Amino acid sequence: MQKTINKPAKIGTYCEDDILFLLKDLSDVGLEDSTANREALMQSGGHYSESLPIEYQPPKEYVDLFWETLHVYKRKVALCIGIVAEQIYRLKGERTVLVSLARAGTPVGILIKRYLKLRYKVALPHYSISIIRDRGIDENAIQYIFREHPDRMIQFVDGWTGKGAISIELTKACQEFERKYGVSLDDTLAVMADPGHCTTLFGTREDFLIPSACLNSTVSGLVSRTVLNHKYIGKEDFHGAKFYKELLAEDVSNEFISLIAEQFTNIFTEAFEASLPKKTEEIQTGFLGMKDVKKIQTEFAIESTNYIKPGVGETTRVLLRRVPWKILMRDSTSPFVQHILMLAKEKGVEVVEYPNLNYLCCGLIKSVKEKHK
């Protein structure tokens, strides 16, 4: 493997004991563009990773709803973390290196690390690296991890699954890495929630509220989405990201981690017992989300499946940083979609009842080619 002078970036508001970011600091680079401009660029052949959306700062009512919901379901979030953490530890033990996929995976990886430290008294290394749809994983970051931890096994971590695009991208990236360097990587993605049935390593398959989707950087260490723009990222660089220091007053990243971690001692036994059947049962993937997506694509005459984002997390992202067309809703009474209904109302986006979904909801992106009015 090639040598590199890259070092972890000192960005974000998390403690270095919780995570190290293998990213290039682009905080001083003007990468933000309006949602409309970015959407037009992406739909005309540009790539989403070359720029950044302007970070949406929600109104007080939205933030209050987020905290209210989180306080009610904090034990459920902790239990899902515990179940997937128990499986990781059973499979790989103390030789594990947690590698979160930035940025949705970052807080989940921190919580898994915190759980295992509290439960088994092990302090696993934890890094956050970039993977980008159609561009692959940051191979320089993977090489760095192997040099630092030659005798350990990588466990990739993300927040949730949608229709499985990142799971598929990770598998392709691992195959490419082995072809190039002769090193085999485990492409099994550990997630808190797998409503898309895209992996065998998960806390739940229920589609529910994932906090890192709801508040963007302010619940993800004030770190931006990752960037791969060759104007700023050289061949031997890590992929890039920005540290939004101007949002320090709004940052709740560590408050969220503490709130969930405080629940761990209450769910140790339940998490352990819930994880045991997964040791012997044959877990199917099936990528059920893609079946929903294909049906929706036909029914609504949508040009590309890239414009269809199933699940609470992905629907939230559509409303926060894309140009939404419609929101399909299986159950508008669920507590996990109230923030989505609030955002849709604020932005004037139509919500359509759509009971036959594997997910609670699905976000449809507007075609800026004027196909949909």
Image: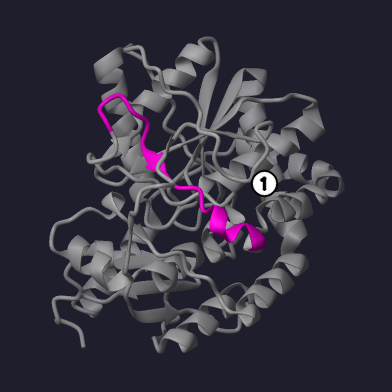
Residue situated furthest right in the rendering: 266
Q: What residue is shown at x 40% (from left), y 43% (from top)?
A: 26
Q: Is residue 12 above or below residue 329?
A: above
* 91 with respect to 318 (left or right): right
Tell me if mark 1 has few (under 14), some (14-19) or many (20+) residues whose alpha carbon lies within 10 angstroms of its own.
Answer: many
Q: Foreground residue, 307 or 141?
A: 141
Q: Quadrant of the C terminus?
A: bottom left
Q: What residue is shown at x 64% (from left), y 73% (from top)?
A: 63
Q: Quadrant of residue 85?
A: top right
Q: Position of residue 186 (x, y in %)?
A: 44, 26
Q: Position of residue 297 (x, y in %)?
A: 24, 71
Taking the magenta stretch, the answer to whether it contains residue 296 is no
Taking the magenta stretch, the answer to whether it contains residue 245 is yes
Asked whether residue 185 appears in the rendered view, the answer is no
Residue situated furthest front in the rendering: 28
Which residue is identified by label 1? Answer: 81
Q: Position of residue 315 (x, y in %)?
A: 44, 69
* 112 with respect to 74 (left or right): left
Asked whether residue 26 appears in the rendered view, the answer is yes
Q: Foreground residue, 210 or 3?
A: 3
Amino acid type, residue under disc 1 in the picture: Ile
Q: Is residue 37 above or below residue 3?
A: below
Q: Quadrant of the N terminus?
A: top left
Q: Position of residue 262 (x, y in %)?
A: 82, 49
Q: Which residues are magenta?
A: 234-249
In the structure shown, which secondary structural element does the residue marked by tag 1 occupy?
A: helix
Q: What residue is shown at x 77% (from left), y 57% (from top)?
A: 75
